[in-house]
Amino acid sequence: MSQIPVELVKLLIALVAIAAFVGLNGLVLVYLERKIAGFVQRRPGPYEVGPHGILQPLADAVKLIGKQLFTPSGADKLLFWTAPVLSFLPVLLLFLPIPFGPTATGMEMNLGLLLILAFSGLNVLALCLAGWGSNNKWGILGAARAVAQSVAYEIPLLLSVLAIAFMTGSLNLSTVVEGQGGWPWQWNVFIQPLAFIIYFVSALGETNRAPFDLPEAESELTAGFHTEYSGMGFGLFFLAEYANMIVVCSVAAALFLGGWQGPFFDGVWWFLLKVYLLLIVMIWLRWTYPRVRFDQLLNINWKWLMPLALFNLFVTAFVMKL
């Protein structure tokens, strides 16, 4: 019984640290997104607030906090305000099994990967509630697209993750990281390059990032599921999107890129470096490629990613059996 309070204290400290990390990363990624967008499209990006616009994310945060919260007429108030909270809260749990360093894991668990895959699905429910509860046709269409997209892209993502689980014989991310070496050729990405590509493309679809940001396509849906949200209602969706980006990149770093291991001085810095490089690639893709049509989005999944993921899984199972 004496162990229970200690574990509880550890868990609470981990959750507070994760919440601080998510908030700080939101500010960093807003700045990175704008600066990379400016660089890619030959514009300066934010430049006025602070040196090289470095305080712009703080100004954005103050603006969002200061805006009035209102419920549209005819909207379901309970669903409308449950959606942004439901979108953000599960994110804190997703970080618990991720091994940031040799001893920097929120909670060691044998089924950590399963927990991440299970709770990440709640974001789809949040988008669905947001669209339906808004009583707005653009919101409902955006929610319907979000559900179709997420359900479709979860399958190849799960199959690519299963290939690594077959290889390592574990769903514990710390065990997967320890099974790899510090040098790049010892990482799983060199053994499973196809699984990594499928995972990364599926992750773009899962996190609604361009060129797969169809649920919030401004050209035909205004802002989709969050059309009616302002202030911190919109801010929570925004923060949850960036947090989910960090989660998928963290899982990719652990499964495919050796996690916190590097050629020398293993530690948290290697993990964060790999995560941020993947995040920069996600942002770079957003500002480089045009948005695909919805039929193209589903064709990419069902005609390409699914067959390739199944093929890769069968080959992995066959090799492991031999």
Image: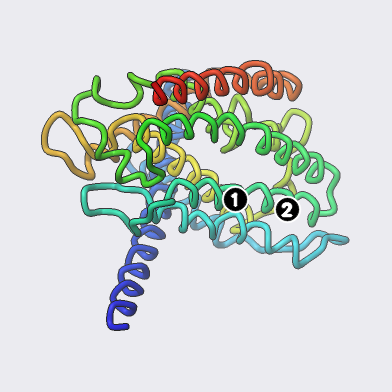
Residue farthest along the bottom direction in this orientation? 1
Asked whether, in this view, residue 137 is left or right of residue 150, the answer is right
Q: Residue placed at 73% from the left, 46% from the top?
A: 227
Q: Residue placed at 36% from the left, 42% from the top?
A: 54
Asked whether, in this view, residue 99 is left or right of residue 183, the answer is right
Real-space Cα distance between discs 1 and 2? 10 Å
Q: How many C-alpha atoms fall within 10 Å of the one at disc 2: few (<14), some, or many (≥20)?
A: many
Q: Earlier in the sequence, mark 1 or mark 2?
A: 2
Element type at mark 2: helix
Quadrant in the picture for residue 40: top left
What percent of the width, then of the height, locates residue 130?
Answer: 73, 53
Quadrant in the picture for residue 295: top right
Element type at mark 1: helix
In this view, 5 is above or below 82 = below
In this view, 137 is above or below 167 = below
Q: Which residue does the numbered mark 2 point to in the structure image? A: 130
Residue farthest along the front direction in this orientation? 322
Identify which residue, 194 or 315, lies in the foreground.
315
**Marks 1 and 2 close (CB-CB < 8 Å):** yes
Please state, as top left, top right, bottom left or bottom right, where the C terminus lies in the image.
Answer: top left
Q: Which residue does the numbered mark 1 point to in the structure image? A: 237
Q: Is residue 310 visible?
A: yes
Any mark on residue 174, and which?
A: none
What percent of the width, then of the height, locates residue 235?
Answer: 57, 53
Q: Is residue 47 visible?
A: no
Q: Amino acid at mark 2?
A: Ala
Identify which residue, 34 or 6, lies in the foreground.
6
Q: Residue placed at 73% from the left, 36% from the top?
A: 148
Q: Amino acid at mark 1?
A: Phe
Q: How many C-alpha atoms fall within 10 Å of the one at disc 1: few (<14), some, or many (≥20)?
A: many
Asked whether, in this view, residue 164 is left or right of residue 271, the answer is right
